[in-house]
Amino acid sequence: MSPETMTLVAEPAIRAALLEDMPFGDASCDAVALRPRRARVLLIAKGDGVICGLDVFERAFRLLDPTARLVAEVGEGDDVAAGQTLGAVEGDVRALLSAERVALNLLQRMSGIATHTRAMVRLLEGTGIRLVDTRKTTPGLRVFEKEAVRVGGAGNHRFCLSDGVMLKDNHLDAAGGIAAGVAAARERAPFVRKVEVEVETLGQVAEAVEAGADIVMLDNMGHDAMAAAVALIDGRAEVEVSGNVDETRVAELADLGVDYVSSGALTHSSPILDLSLKHLEYLD
């Protein structure tokens, strides 16, 4: 995540998390840390996984103490092991105490998603299929969760509704069908945006292709039906598979020859990577 993105998109979310955690100050910190004092605390992994969100982690402390810094011993996207010291945070002890939970929550969440994503990506290695995420993200945390997917090795689908045209079942009902929906999108949407159509039957596949869809999403279809759909499309549109895609199902999709597999599980069902801050000591 670039510094510019951090400032424009991510930083307000970090500020909101800090405000949520201490709207009227930090009673525990105020009781034991009465004045500014430089200190250091170690970041330690409690599980194996992929580390992601180091800049976000550091920024949580720097918003309370601009001089705080993370002295990292690992880089973004590195594999880490349980018990490994990943670095140290240095800064005003009050910032270290007060921002600890917010910083860890974000780092753990992002690292957990990156870890899960990397495992899923490996199941598709050598197939030419691109694993992508969805908009099934935690409200307010999308920028962090989609960045974690990217660090884990998968791609980002639409970041938001402004990014592209995806005509799902309700859109098609509203438009009066697939042909009408695609025609309306071609007329009204910016020409640089692709038009994707979600389908559930082979009949709808044929309609979407004939209507000129750029991408056909095969939603919750059986394996044989998806194979037939790929043959029917025959390269006239890109093909995406979606619907309850987890580790078990993604391995079953490898032989279909589709372009994309999208998985909401990357963001809505990834466990955290357990991390902790320990062994705080004063530096003066």
Image (tube, grey):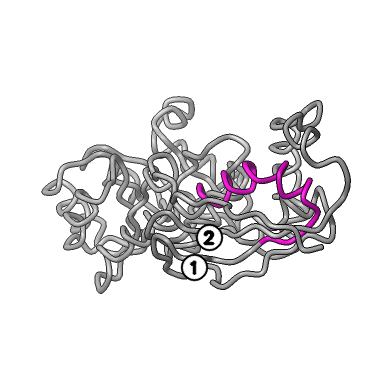
Q: Position of residue 20 (x, y in %)?
A: 71, 30
Residue 118 sits in quarter? bottom left
Residue 140 vs residue 196, the one in the foreground: 140
Dot 2 crowding, Cα within 10 Å, few <14, some 14–19, many 20+ = many
Quarter holding the C terminus is: bottom right
Which residue position is annotated with label 2? 52
Position of 229 with respect to 21 (left or right) is: left
Please give left or right for residue 147 compared with residue 199 in the image. Answer: right
Is 49 in front, or is 156?
49
Q: Is most of the magenta stretch helix, strand or loop?
A: helix
Asked whether, in this view, residue 111 is left or right of residue 62, the answer is left
CA gap, disc 2 and disc 1: 6 Å
Whether residues under marks 2 and 1 lie with C-beta atoms below 8 angstroms apart, the answer is yes
Q: Which residue is mark 1?
A: 77
Q: Which residues are magenta?
A: 89-109
Task: Tally the marks.
Answer: 2
Q: Quadrant of the N terminus?
A: bottom right
Task: Pick whichever, 32 or 85, lies toward us.
Answer: 32
Residue 55 occupies quadrant: bottom right
Helix, strand or loop for disc 2:
loop
